[in-house]
Amino acid sequence: MTSSYLTSIIKQFEYYKNLGEKTFSQITDSDLHWQYNSESNSIAIITKHLVGNMLSRWTNFLTEDGEKTWRERDQEFEDTYSNKEEMLKAWQKGWKCLFEAIIPLKEKQLEQIVYIRNQGHTVTEAINRQLAHYAYHVGQLVFLGKMIKGDNWKSLSIPKGKSTAFNQEKFAQEKQRKHFTDDLK
């Protein structure tokens, strides 16, 4: 299981990064700051929070607590990106930090204990925790994108009314061992 785990987890993170980027490609600079109400977060704010979390969790992942003393989490919920280019640069920096931490991991390190706010996790548990956290927030990004674009939204998964055709295409193929993201563009 462990040999497939590391490969699979990298593909899962790449998948959620890609969903975010496909959302960003459909929105404008002004769309970044749209909020449903004063208590909700914009795409820019959610992205800023994700980046802050990634930099904190994955910097010196195996040797330092995942909640860094230099992190200013409350400031992550202040909308400060002036444009999409600035936001995307930060987004890439966060993901770069994540991938530089997990790509070199070896199976024997998966049971090593790392800490997040002084709570011990195995490396596997810490990775799973972050994958769930990022999927949660990327889902929010996608949902906001759909709300903002309305009828102009281009689906990032199987479009409504297309499930039967999608399944027919999949079941027409030979059974094979592969990751579900291998066929995504």
Image: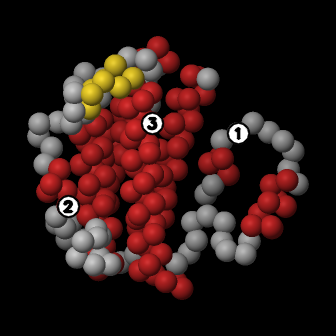
Q: CA distance from mark 1 to mark 3?
A: 20 Å
Percent from the top left, x then y, of residue 1? 61, 23
Residue mark closest to the camera, 2 vs 1: 2
**Secondary structure under the numbered disc 1 in the rendered image:** loop
Q: Residues within 10 Å of mark 3 (few under 14, many from 20)?
A: few
Q: Is residue 139 above or below residue 15?
A: below
- The residue identified by callout 1 is 178
- The residue identified by callout 3 is 128
Q: Which of the two residues, 183 or 73, is positioned nearer the viewer here? A: 73
**Secondary structure under the numbered disc 3 in the rendered image:** helix
Q: Earlier in the sequence, mark 1 or mark 3?
A: 3
Q: Which of the 4 quarters of the picture holds residue 170? A: bottom right
Residue mark closest to the camera, 1 vs 3: 3
> Where's the C terminus, which quadrant?
bottom right
Q: Which of the two residues, 134 or 98, is positioned nearer the viewer here? A: 134
Dots 2, 1 in contact, CB < 8 A: no
Q: Residues within 10 Å of mark 2 (few under 14, many from 20)?
A: some
- The residue identified by callout 2 is 77
* Residue visible at 56% across and 75% down in the picture: 154
Q: Earlier in the sequence, mark 3 or mark 2?
A: 2
Q: Is residue 39 left or right of residue 167?
A: left
Say what amino acid the circle numbered 1 marks: Lys
